[in-house]
């Protein structure tokens, strides 16, 4: 799906942010089709999957998924098809084992944007990001999808989308 283009960018805590928003229901599937390298070779902590906690299957657990304090952590991702993308997803991407943390999901609130100055939810999001220092944070709620990254090359690649 090609969303209507309202793209914003910003910088915060050493992270570059790009987000898209408009009258559309974004999914990380849209992003993964275009930039799979954003997660391939990394491990992902899932804060939200379809507006809730992700529960790996027995097969996924046997293949290296972990659940710590109710949060799911992937093994190193070889293909984006290994990740659930049902909508209202929020992922924290790490180069190595993700930090065990009580991940609060922000995409489950209509209109959440990490770029909204003065919004207490955005401030709380940034406190969480600063505490755990992921490589990237990927989120898709309604009507906003965003990428938060410390990787300048990836930011340049993602900025060319849509």
Image (spheres, grey):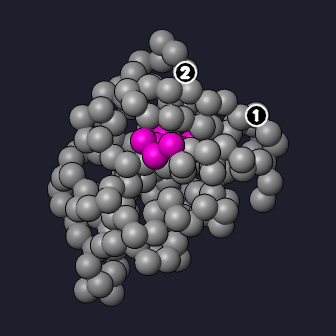
Q: Which residue is mark 1?
A: 6
Q: Which residue is mark 2?
A: 116
153 relative to 105 in the view: left or right: right
| Foreground of the two, 21 or 111 | 21
Residue 151 covered by magenta stretch = yes
Q: Residue at x 29, y 41 (%)?
A: 133
Q: Residue furthest front?
A: 153
Q: Main secondary structure of the magenta part?
A: strand
Looking at the image, residue 87 lies above or below residue 128: below
From mark 2 to mark 1, how far is it between C-alphas? 14 Å
Q: Quadrant of the N terminus?
A: bottom right
Q: Residue at x 21, y 47 (%)?
A: 101
Query: Of label 2 and label 1, which has the lower sequence position?
Result: 1
| Foreground of the two, 158 or 85 | 158
**Mark 1 secondary-structure assignment:** loop
- Mark 1 closeness class: few <14, some 14–19, many ≥20 residues within 10 Å: few
**Mark 2 secondary-structure assignment:** loop
Q: Position of residue 75 (x, y in %)?
A: 30, 73
Q: Position of residue 149 (x, y in %)?
A: 46, 43
Looking at the image, residue 6 lies above or below residue 97: above
24 relative to 94 in the view: left or right: right
Residue 114 covered by magenta stretch = no
Q: Is residue 28 visible?
A: yes
- In contact (CB < 8 Å): disc 2 and disc 1: no
Q: Position of residue 99 (x, y in %)?
A: 21, 52
Q: Which residues are magenta?
A: 145-152
Q: Residue at x 26, y 61 (%)?
A: 96
């Amino acid at each position: 799906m090609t969303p209507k283009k309202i793209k914003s960018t910003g910088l915060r805590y050493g992270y570059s942010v790009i987000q898209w928003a408009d009258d559309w229901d974004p999914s990380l599937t849209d992003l993964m089709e275009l930039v799979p390298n954003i997660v391939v070779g990394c491990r992902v902590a899932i804060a939200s999957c379809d507006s809730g906690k992700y529960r790996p299957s027995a097969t996924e657990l046997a293949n290296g998924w972990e659940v710590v304090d109710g949060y799911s952590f992937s093994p190193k991702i070889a293909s984006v098809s290994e990740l659930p993308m049902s909508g209202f997803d929020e992922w924290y991407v790490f180069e190595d084992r993700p930090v065990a943390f009580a991940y609060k999901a922000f995409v489950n609130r209509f209109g959440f944007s990490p770029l909204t100055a003065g919004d207490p939810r955005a401030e709380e999001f940034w406190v969480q990001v600063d505490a755990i220092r992921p490589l990237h944070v990927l989120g898709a709620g309604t009507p906003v999808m965003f990428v938060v990254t410390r990787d300048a090359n990836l930011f340049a690649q993602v900025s060319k989308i849509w």
